[in-house]
């Protein structure tokens, strides 16, 4: 077991390796924020600006990583419109494979130890019944705010890459890859879709340096006036022959034109050509967030699994406000 340290690029790659092994064994047990692509995206875009608030611990058997915990501690987020947001609660991303389930208690004890006096949240997979029991035994409860009509729990959707429709764009729109469009266009497309966003040119450079990023699997849609109206990145897991969309976004002035649907279909064709046979994408699952879910369902995705948001409130002497997790969702 490694002592607590800040998360490094090498750590992220070890975590991705464990994600691949769990995906091959029990894909329904890959936790929220612990998938191969999600780890790449979160590390790449955030390590330069948020890395000082990231603390991790790794568990090994010999040289093999067998569990990890990644605690995101309170920090300040600076966004593209000049605003700042203080994240006052802690969040844990983690993964414990089913053949080492006894380590769940150690992960929980470590997380509690580095977040004393702080409100803390975690999202284990709904299929991991053993882990859910252990979190409950340590005082974690279902988070009612996260499960509300506009809550922040996520579902993972999947489909195979057989029988793909051909994408159809409106007249004058066309596809580009990030390799073709360049870094400035790729960053602008993302910031426009998710404004206000903490994403920057520096964050994109981090994404580009994070395996398995490929510029030819980063798709943009250009509008007739030259605006990059939509974009998505696909993360190819060659070991499991699967790929993941993360993130997916459209410029607010170009929504409801069928761009997202065409882009996803085009992306799946590219992923299949690159060797993938299976595709996943996550979205918010609460009833009040129907748009992304409807988009993914329209191109053949269906819910595969979901997470179970849990919370452990801080002692009253430290404040009893609700958790501020929006920036974990912020793309």
Image (cartoon, grey):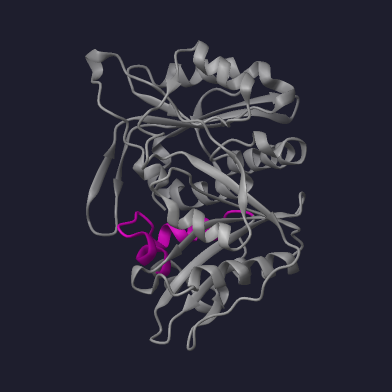
Which residue is at the front of the view, 56 or 314? 314
Residue visible at 25% across and 21% down in the picture: 320
How far across and how far down the image is residue 90, in percent?
38, 29
Residue visible at 49% across and 76% down in the picture: 221
Which residue is at the front of the view, 116 or 137? 137
Dominant secondary structure, magenta = helix
The relative height of residue 105 versus residue 153 in the rendered view (above or below) is above
- Snapshot quadrant of residue 203: bottom left
Q: Is residue 20 left or right of residue 253?
A: right
Which residue is at the front of the view, 80 or 23? 23
Residue visible at 38% across and 86% down in the picture: 225
The relative height of residue 313 versus residue 250 in the rendered view (above or below) is above
How far across and how far down the image is residue 247, in percent?
50, 57
How far across and how far down the image is residue 178, in percent?
54, 72
The relative height of residue 173 versus residue 57 in the rendered view (above or below) is below
- Snapshot quadrant of residue 35: top right
- The N terminus lies in which quarter of the figure? top right
Q: Residue at the far top: name it.
A: 137
Residue visible at 42% across and 69% down in the picture: 189
How far across and how far down the image is residue 319, in percent?
23, 20
Residue 169: in magenta span = no
Report the span colored magenta: 189-211
Residue 207: in magenta span = yes
């Amino acid at each position: 077991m490694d002592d607590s340290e800040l998360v490094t690029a090498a750590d992220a790659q070890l975590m991705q390796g464990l994600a691949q092994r769990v995906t091959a064994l029990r894909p329904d047990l890959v936790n929220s924020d612990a998938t191969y692509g999600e780890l790449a995206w979160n590390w790449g875009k955030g390590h330069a600006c948020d890395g000082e608030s990231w603390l991790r611990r790794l568990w090994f058997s010999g040289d093999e990583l067998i569990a990890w915990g990644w605690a995101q501690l309170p920090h300040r987020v600076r966004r593209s419109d000049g605003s700042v947001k203080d994240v006052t609660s802690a969040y844990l991303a983690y993964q414990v494979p089913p053949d080492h389930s006894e380590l769940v208690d150690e992960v929980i004890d470590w997380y509690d130890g580095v977040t004393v006096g702080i409100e803390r949240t975690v999202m284990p997979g709904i299929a991991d019944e053993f882990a859910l029991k252990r979190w409950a035994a340590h005082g974690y409860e279902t988070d009612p705010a996260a499960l509300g009509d506009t809550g922040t729990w996520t579902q993972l959707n999947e489909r195979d890459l057989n029988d793909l429709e051909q994408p159809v764009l409106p007249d004058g729109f066309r596809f580009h890859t990030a390799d073709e469009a360049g870094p400035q266009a790729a960053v602008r497309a993302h910031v426009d879709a998710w404004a206000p966003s903490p994403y920057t040119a520096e964050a994109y450079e981090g994404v580009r340096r994070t395996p398995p990023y490929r510029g030819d699997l980063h798709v943009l849609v250009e509008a007739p006036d030259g605006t990059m109206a939509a974009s998505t990145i696909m993360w190819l897991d060659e070991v499991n022959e699967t790929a993941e969309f993360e993130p997916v976004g459209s410029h607010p002035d170009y929504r409801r034109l069928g761009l997202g649907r065409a882009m996803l279909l085009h992306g799946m064709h590219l992923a299949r050509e690159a060797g993938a046979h299976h595709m996943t994408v996550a979205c918010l699952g609460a009833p009040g967030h129907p748009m992304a879910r409807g988009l993914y369902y329209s191109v053949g995705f269906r819910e595969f699994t979901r997470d179970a948001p849990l919370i452990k409130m801080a002692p009253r002497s430290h404040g009893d406000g609700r958790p501020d997790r929006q920036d974990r969702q912020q793309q």
